[in-house]
Image (cartoon, grey):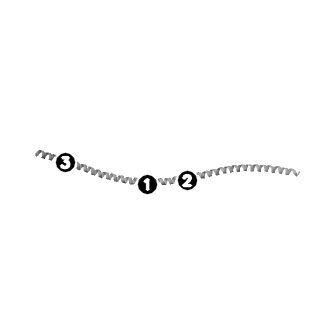
């Protein structure tokens, strides 16, 4: 008579053990899934950190390039200003020289007119003599 309650208790404990083992197996599967997911996330993190480092290097290179281009622009602007000053000076020189040329042409026309008058005077004197 005393064995029946013990057998019942053993049966209950076996069921509890089976449930515990099933729970343990399920938790181990979950742990394996989480480990795989964690491993995948770690690989993604490593890849993201490498990409970040490459992007930072690219950014630094672009900053250097931008700085060089700004210096080049400043230098070209200085050269352009100098060239503009030289052009303005050349235009002024050209205008002065053109005025001298125009004045000389006027003088030549006037002198040619005088020569023509003198030639006529000489011809008149030749005719009179």
Residue 22's tag is none
Q: Position of residue 109 (x, y in %)?
A: 22, 48
Q: Which element is circle 1 on?
A: helix
Calculate the distance from the C-alpha at mark 2 to the C-alpha at mark 1. Answer: 27 Å
Q: Earlier in the sequence, mark 2 or mark 3?
A: 2
Q: Earlier in the sequence, mark 1 or mark 3?
A: 1
Q: Are marks 1 and 3 in contact (CB under 8 Å)?
A: no
Q: Position of residue 105 (x, y in %)?
A: 25, 49
Residue sitting at x 42%, y 53%: 77
Q: Are marks 2 and 1 in contact (CB under 8 Å)?
A: no
Q: Position of residue 114 (x, y in %)?
A: 19, 48
Calculate the distance from the C-alpha at mark 1 to the C-alpha at mark 3. Answer: 59 Å
Q: Which element is circle 2 on?
A: helix
Local packing at callout 3 (Cα closer than 10 Å; few below 14, some 14-19, many 20+) is: few
- Quickly name the residue at label 2: 57
The answer to which of 97 and 115 lies nearer the viewer is 115
Residue 75's tag is 1
Q: Is residue 49 left or right of residue 67?
A: right
Residue sitting at x 48%, y 54%: 68
- Quickly name the residue at label 3: 115
């Amino acid at each position: 008579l005393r064995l029946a309650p013990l057998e019942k208790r053993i049966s209950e404990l076996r069921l509890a053990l089976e449930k515990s083992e099933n729970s343990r197996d399920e938790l181990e599967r979950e742990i394996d899934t989480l480990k795989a997911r964690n491993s995948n996330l770690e690989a993604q993190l490593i890849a993201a950190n490498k990409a970040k480092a490459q992007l930072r290097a690219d950014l630094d290179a672009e900053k250097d390039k931008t700085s060089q281009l700004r210096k080049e622009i400043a230098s070209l602007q200085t050269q352009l200003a100098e060239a503009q000053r030289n052009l303005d000076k050349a235009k002024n020189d050209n205008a002065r020289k053109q005025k001298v040329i125009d004045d000389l042409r006027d003088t030549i026309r006037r002198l040619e007119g005088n020569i023509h008058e003198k030639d006529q005077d000489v011809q008149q004197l030749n005719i009179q003599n």
